[in-house]
Amino acid sequence: MGADAQADGFQVTFASVGSKASTVDAGDGPGALAAVPGDSWLGIGVGNLGGRVQDALKQIGQAGAFAGVNLDQLLAQLKAQSGIDLQADLLDWMGDAAIFVRGTSVGDIGGGLIVHSKDPSATQRGVARIAKLLRRQGQTVTRATGNGIDTGFSFKVSNGIEVFLVSAGDKFVAAVGRSALDAALSGKQTLGDSPGFQQAASQLGDGLKPSVFFAMDPVLQLVDSVGASSTGNFQQVEPYLKAFTTIVAGGKRSGDVSKGRIVIGVK
């Protein structure tokens, strides 16, 4: 691991040699991150989400076998009780995915999860079964329409916050707030087209592409919109927060060498 400080920020580079290669397809997490809404101030891309979860479950199952826990039985019980087959209804169709958060005021803040679907028909079945499960539990479920939605629904959680789960073409979107859903489905302005993101991504160098992105200015605008910026505690840390611009991180693997870098920009 090594660190380097410059006038416009500092970076941490790390590498490991001889680590065991994963048998799971890595997918394209950076591509998923670049496709989130362009005004997102936080984004995390994950390649091949379904494959990674399946691999994690496999490892958990192997560890559980030593502790007398049968993961297959637990998943069978889940299917019997909920009607949802975790493998067929969710994991099998999940490809590259990204989490995003956007908004600079209480009225427009929101975010969600965008997953590329490898089988839109299976995605639609999974969404319908989740809706059925929520209804059985007494949750009020409302059909979601518009913006190319093939099937989907919404429900409200605490404080009246509306959550959407929809299938639209080859996308599955779980979003908090209608504006976040519309932004995720439109695809007109993506984070990859944002000059701020492009500048931050270029700082990684060595052919690395970002899988994590964070911008400070929109967060400060959000804090100011809720009046928190006038509190004494925040005023003490505000000058330090304003000094930061973006944080971007990415990594890649070549043979038995894994390399990553985090770049923190400052004014």
Image (cartoon, rainbow, N blue to C red):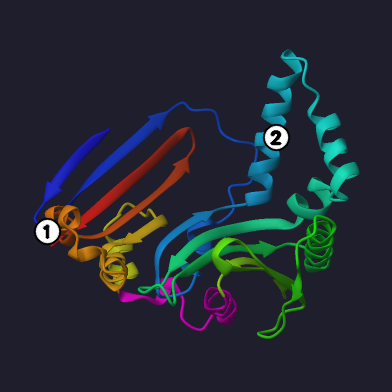
Which tag, 2 or 1, sits closer to the chain's start?
A: 2
Q: Which quadrant of the rendered structure holds the C terminus?
A: bottom left
| Label 2 Cα crowd, 10 Å radius (few <14 / some 14-19 / many 20+) | some
Question: Can residue 199 be seen here?
Answer: yes
| Label 1 Cα crowd, 10 Å radius (few <14 / some 14-19 / many 20+) | few
Q: Position of residue 206 (x, y in %)?
A: 32, 51
- Marks 2/1: CA–CA distance: 44 Å
Q: Residue at x 75, y 67 (%)?
A: 140
- Specify the amino acid type for callout 2: Leu
Q: Residue at x 77, y 52 (%)?
A: 92
Residue 66 lies left or right of residue 18; in this view the side is right
Tell which of 119 and 133 is nearer to you.
133
Residue with the most extreme left position: 7
Q: Is residue 103 above or below residue 244?
A: below
Q: Main secondary structure of the magenta part?
A: helix
Which residue position holds label 1? 239
Q: Which quadrant of the rendered structure holds the N terminus?
A: top left
Where disc 1 sits, the SS reads helix
Magenta-colored span: 178-195
Using the rendered view, name the quadrant where residue 123 is placed.
bottom right
Which residue position holds label 2? 57
